[in-house]
Image (cartoon, helix red, strand yellow):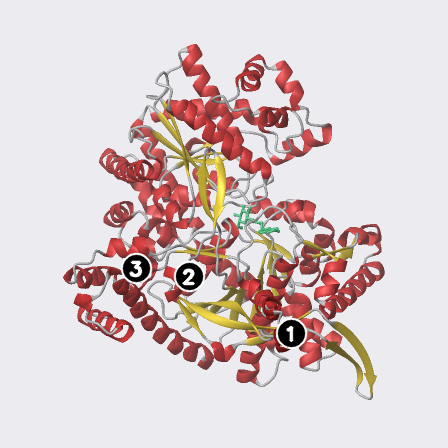
């Protein structure tokens, strides 16, 4: 598109939508018109891409995920289409600043954390690499809550993103699907055999809304299809006639509640009917849609697995297994065996956690009540699976109870996936080993080759090129722009490792980005930070296992050593960003602890030139885009064996931050890339953690035998923090703490001493930073989706 064409299109959009001239339009009208211009352009490309994909009979992947943490789209789409500067110029003529439009856009926060952001990165990369893909999820009216901190307490407020973000969605009511819940099943024998009938069900309509995914300089445009729930039985006339007005609309509310809000927890099973309904709703709608499209094109479902792969992102869409069976058998007349063969060959699954509380299970009672037909299918899958293990793997007879899909009164979604899917993968080398050796060990023995690894990745165009243009421009100047489409080319930077002028420019860019973040911090929380201080960031969901508490305890220790022992350190600013799920009491207490620590330290003139703490409220994708480029230290300090991969670690790394981290998740691979001399590794390893756990972890002994640690904890018990009581936290640390904060405390402290020392040698620091950037290419999601496409999905690119 030329600048002239863009101008025309924006002008037309303004007149069509608002019946006025662009010169007279409000900024909001311009904002909506620019979005509409981009959507139109992408839709045009999408429909010609669809035709080409159909013509080439390409195999397609459907990526099923309850979460897609998209963030903002305007800048990303303009960048990907290569028209950002042209649009900026057109808007300038209208006296509108493009940056101002960017700031008007809300984040599409349709996810909780890493899992959802990964799905968004993958759709972006799949498109950029020309793989035919569609994402399926839910059109939540409200995304992840907006976090406000009041006196240290997290408060949650609704996130009405559609008001200003809905312009990206194209409704497709003609492709709506009907979903059936509740009721009873009846089995009927006839001359044609056994027929199962689902009766007295409750119907909900699933209406698709498409969000275009632009890729980068791509031949194709893919889409993310989000299902919105609409009532089909929205009005009960008989109730209305009897004067029960409110009740008469209940059908409406119950159906439409399904897509009202994202579940804001990524840690524990809530066991709520609504979540099960959400899962079945989007799984059933998507699979019906997939089968209809396939039938339209090929006239048969016999070859489904040759042309379609459905990817299950964590266990949340695991109902794909019984739902695909149901559709094949009940709607399309396949026998059990034929349906099972197709189902197993079509479905692949990624596991994203080994934490038992996050592995989904549903009580039989709830499951069978709301999904009666699906339950009968799961029962039969379980019966056949157990029988198969019993007959064909006698050595595993003792493990059947553990491996079964139904056990202890629950339907176990992870087991369902592993029993059926043709591929199961973990998300980092370490995590995938733990799956093979531990969580899914018995399955690994009977299905050799099924379990594999694909280390996570990030779309480096968003996380480096778009969010850190200064760095991206410097890199382009040094090694050309090949790295934009081939992350591995970043390695060419290594030849500047000892080039002082390059290292100094790197430092200047970091400083600019720190200034930008400092302005944001002052504006958002009124704290003035020293831009020459070390910017040390821990930004991620708040979880005990991620150990924000380890960092906080260390800060308190620093504070006391500065005050009581006259310790001098390079000025250090610790920045936190983290949402806690609403019902997670300990996580909220940790936020309160960090905030209290901040209030005390930031207001103590005895330390305030050396130490600052900032808790940034409402951490989200658009905030991460400001944080990552400004960070110098990246905190990745989970207890070894608990963080499946982490992806924040990769975003910090590619922006030149140095990792202080344990050998957990993808940190292991970061370490492999940069070596121990370019990061600050500390703490127990996974085998050490396991050994320590087996022998019994007794933090009370650490407390008793380490006078310094005892003093530190006693002082919290005695004085609280800034007058606030945190006894519960100390009791937790010396009592049950399953994440062994005290065991790693001294090692962590030593790692920080080293950070402080190395920072005193700027050339050394910047050299380490450059090595990190140069070695981050392997964490590009282009690499990750290629591995999925080649090794798991067997997809080819569109030619
Ligand atoms: C689990 C549950 C349990 C029921 C309540 C709602 C809910 C929502 C989400 C989850 C998933 C937790 C798993 C997860 O988020 N894993 C993260 O996945 C990232 C991408 O692979 C990875 O980088 C992180 O290490 C991993 O914690």
Q: Where is residue 531, by image quadrant?
A: top left
Q: Is residue 322 above or below residue 487?
A: below
Q: State which quarter of the image contains the N terminus.
A: bottom left
If you read the primary sequence from the N terminus, does the residue marked by circle 2 or circle 3 appear first? 3
Horizontal relation, residue 521 to residue 96: left or right? right
- Helix, strand or loop status at disc 2: helix
Question: Which residue is disc 2 drawn over?
Answer: 162
Q: Residue at x 35, y 76 (%)?
A: 44
Q: Nearer the viewer, mark 2 or mark 3?
A: 2
The extreme top residue here reads 565
- Helix, strand or loop status at disc 3: helix
Residue 280, position as x, y percentages in the image: 63, 65
- Helix, strand or loop status at disc 1: loop
Question: Which residue is disc 1 drawn over?
Answer: 242
Q: Residue at x 33, y 53 (%)?
A: 483
The extreme bottom residue here reads 191
Q: Which mark is residue 79?
A: 3
Cα gap from disc 1 to disc 2, whole angstroms = 36 Å
Cα gap from disc 2 to disc 3, whole angstroms = 23 Å
């Amino acid at each position: 598109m030329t600048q002239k064409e863009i101008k025309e299109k924006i002008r037309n959009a303004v007149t069509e939508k608002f019946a006025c001239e662009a010169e007279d339009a409000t900024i909001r009208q311009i904002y909506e018109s620019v979005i509409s211009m981009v959507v139109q352009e992408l839709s045009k490309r999408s429909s010609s891409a669809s035709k080409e994909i159909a013509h080439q009979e390409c195999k397609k992947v459907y990526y099923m995920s309850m979460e897609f943490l998209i963030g903002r789209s305007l800048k990303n789409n303009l960048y990907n289409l290569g028209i950002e500067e042209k649009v900026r110029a057109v808007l300038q003529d209208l006296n509108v600043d493009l940056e101002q439009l960017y700031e008007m856009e809300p984040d599409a926060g349709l996810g909780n954390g890493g899992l959802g952001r990964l799905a968004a990165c993958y759709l972006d990369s799949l498109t950029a690499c020309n793989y035919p893909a569609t994402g399926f999820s839910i059109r939540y009216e409200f995304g992840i809550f907006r976090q406000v901190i009041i006196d240290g307490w997290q408060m949650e407020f609704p996130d009405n993103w559609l008001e200003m973000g809905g312009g990206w969605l194209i409704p497709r009511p003609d492709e709506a699907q009907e979903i059936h819940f509740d009721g009873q099943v009846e089995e009927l024998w006839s001359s044609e055999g056994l027929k199962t009938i689902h009766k007295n069900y409750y119907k909900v309509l699933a209406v698709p809304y498409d969000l275009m995914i632009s890729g980068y300089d791509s031949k194709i445009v893919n889409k993310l299809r989000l299902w919105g729930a609409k009532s089909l039985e929205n009005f009960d006339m008989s109730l209305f006639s009897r004067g029960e007005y409110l009740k008469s609309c209940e059908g409406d509310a119950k159906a439409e509640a399904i897509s009202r809000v994202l579940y804001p927890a990524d840690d524990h099973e809530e066991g709520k009917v609504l979540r099960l309904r959400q899962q079945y709703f989007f799984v059933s709608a998507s699979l019906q849609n997939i089968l209809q499209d396939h039938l339209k094109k090929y006239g048969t479902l016999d070859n489904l697995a040759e042309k379609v792969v459905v990817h299950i992102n964590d266990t949340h869409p695991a109902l794909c297994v019984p739902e695909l069976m149901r559709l094949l058998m009940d709607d399309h007349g396949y026998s059990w065996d034929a349906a099972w063969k197709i189902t197993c060959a079509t479905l692949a699954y990624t596991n994203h956690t080994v934490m038992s509380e996050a592995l989904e299970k549903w009580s039989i009672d709830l499951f069978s009540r709301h999904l009666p037909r699906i339950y009968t299918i799961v029962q039969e899958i379980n019966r056949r699976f157990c029988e198969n293990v019993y007959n064909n793997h006698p050595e595993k007879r003792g493990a059947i109870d553990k491996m079964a899909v139904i056990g202890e009164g629950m339907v176990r979604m992870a087991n369902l996936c592993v029993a059926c899917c043709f591929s199961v993968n973990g998300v980092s080398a370490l995590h995938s080993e733990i799956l093979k050796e531990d969580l899914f060990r018995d399955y690994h023995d009977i299905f050799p080759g099924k379990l594999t690894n694909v280390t996570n990745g990030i779309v480096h165009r968003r996380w480096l090129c778009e969010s850190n243009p200064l760095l991206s421009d410097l890199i382009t100047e040094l090694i050309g722009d090949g790295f934009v489409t081939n992350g591995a080319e970043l390695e060419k930077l290594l030849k500047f490792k000892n080039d002082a002028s390059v290292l100094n420019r790197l430092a200047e860019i970091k400083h600019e980005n720190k200034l930008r973040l400092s302005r944001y911090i002052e504006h958002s929380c009124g704290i003035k930070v020293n831009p020459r201080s070390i910017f040390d960031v821990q930004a991620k969901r708040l979880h005990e296992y991620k150990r924000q508490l380890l960092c906080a305890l260390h800060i308190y220790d620093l504070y006391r050593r500065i005050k009581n022992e006259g310790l001098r350190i390079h000025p250090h600013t610790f920045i936190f960003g983290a949402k806690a799920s609403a019902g997670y009491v300990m996580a909220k207490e940790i936020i309160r602890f960090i905030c209290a620590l901040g209030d005390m330290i930031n207001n103590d003139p005895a330390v305030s030139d050396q130490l600052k703490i900032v808790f940034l409220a409402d951490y989200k994708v658009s905030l991460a885009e400001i944080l990552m480029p400004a960070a110098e230290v990246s905190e990745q300090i989970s207890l070894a064996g608990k963080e499946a991969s982490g992806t924040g670690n990769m975003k910090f790394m590619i922006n030149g931050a140095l990792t202080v981290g344990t050998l957990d998740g993808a940190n292991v691979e970061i370490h492999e890339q940069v070596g121990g001399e370019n990061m600050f590794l500390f703490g127990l390893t996974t085998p050490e953690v396991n050994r320590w756990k087996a022998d019994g972890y007794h933090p009370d002994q650490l407390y008793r035998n380490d006078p310094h640690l005892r003093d530190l904890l006693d002082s919290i018990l005695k004085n609280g923090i800034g007058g606030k009581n945190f006894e519960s936290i100390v009791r937790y640390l010396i009592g049950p703490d399953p994440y062994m904060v005290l065991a790693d405390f001294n090692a962590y402290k030593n790692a920080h001493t080293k950070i402080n020392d190395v920072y005193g040698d700027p050339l050394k620091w910047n050299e380490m930073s450059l090595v990190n950037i140069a070695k981050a290419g392997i964490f590009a999601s282009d690499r990750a989706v290629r591995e999925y496409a080649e090794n798991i999905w067997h997809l080819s690119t569109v030619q």
